[in-house]
Image (spheres, rainbow, N blue to C red):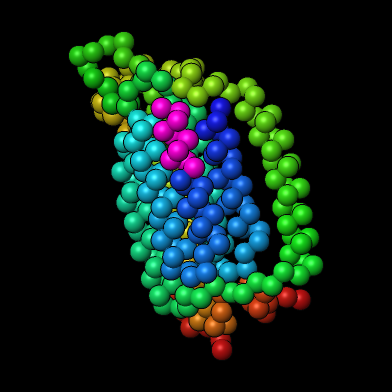
Amino acid sequence: MIVYILCFILFLVGLYGLITRRNLIKIVISLSIMEFSVFLFLVIIGYIDSGIAPIVDLKETNQIYVDPLPQAMVLTAIVIGLATTAMLLAIAIRLYRKYKTFDIREINNLRG
Amino acid sequence: MELTLSILIGFMIIGAIFAIHAKDLLSAVISVGIVGYSLVIVFLLLKAPDLAIVQIVIETITLIIMVAVVLDSTREELKIKNDFKSFTNITLSIIFAAVLLFFFVQATADLNSFGQHSLRMADAYVTGAAEKTGSINLVTGILFDFRAYDTLGEVTILFAAALGVLTILRIKGKK
């Protein structure tokens, strides 16, 4: 149970950064921290105490494996996380070249 | 096992807090590296070697991109003064965290305790998977056989993101 709570705290740390920081790079960092905490939570759910890594040993039947399903899904999510982070950073560097700052309070040309 | 995990996750939390509060953007980026690489160790402890390999590659790529962005622009963190607005922000985030905590408690009440997971959902994937898919690695079997369309979607997203990054960085905007 304590590991679930620690995962939740990690998520909250990311959320805190996302809300309170005004720097685009810090916002990207906070988003990736939140991502990490969710991956961690999903993999922890699939863990079994006496289980071994989900690689089948054809000679030994009746082995207990840890749940491979969350691992496969998290693998997909990690790669998508890279895609979103790269996209966010590209937008950030683009905005920096136009406004000469990472401050989201000064990037307000789209304001109506 | 649970104690080792708790220590590592605590380490990750400290790294995350430092990353958010660092005065220098470069050290903030490096501190995210602490979180990411600790995640690799946690994955290894949780018997997920495939995830650990993927995570270490992805984390390295992300760090390289982030360091390149920071070195190409500025390293200094903005100065934030404490005004009334930040006070409302903090209050709002505390309320938000309390709401999240409520849902977290509700959601984890039905979960099995750590290490007592049952293979109820994954049973169909695990039994006879090596014969069905021809791959002795169950994660690879699920990813590229049972759920191959998911992987196709993932590759599509990666392709679209690469195209998007190229487009964003190439065009010249109005001054």
Quarter of the image for residue B84 reads bottom right
**Number of callouts in the render?**
0
Instruction: Measuring from the top left, give residue B157's x and y in whole percent.
Output: 45, 53
Q: Quadrant of the N terminus of chain B?
A: top left
Looking at this view, is A57 or B38 the one in front?
B38
Q: Residue at x 47, y 41 (%)?
A: B9
**What span is colored magenta in the figure?**
B1-10
Instruction: Measuring from the top left, give residue B61's x and y in whole percent.
Output: 35, 58
Q: Quadrant of the C terminus of chain B?
A: bottom right
Q: Residue at x 35, y 41 (%)?
A: B41
Instruction: Measuring from the top left, give residue B123's x and y in whole percent.
Output: 43, 17
Q: Is residue A25 above or below residue B119?
A: below
Query: Can residue A87 be seen by looking at this rendering?
Result: no
- Image side of residue B20 versus residue B132, left or right: right
- Image side of residue A102 versus residue B127, left or right: right
Query: Can residue B35 be seen by looking at this rendering?
Result: yes
Residue B80 among magenta residues: no
Quarter of the image for residue B128 reads top left
Looking at this view, is B60 or B76 the one in front?
B76
Q: Residue at x 44, y 34 (%)?
A: B5
**Magenta region's main secondary structure?**
helix
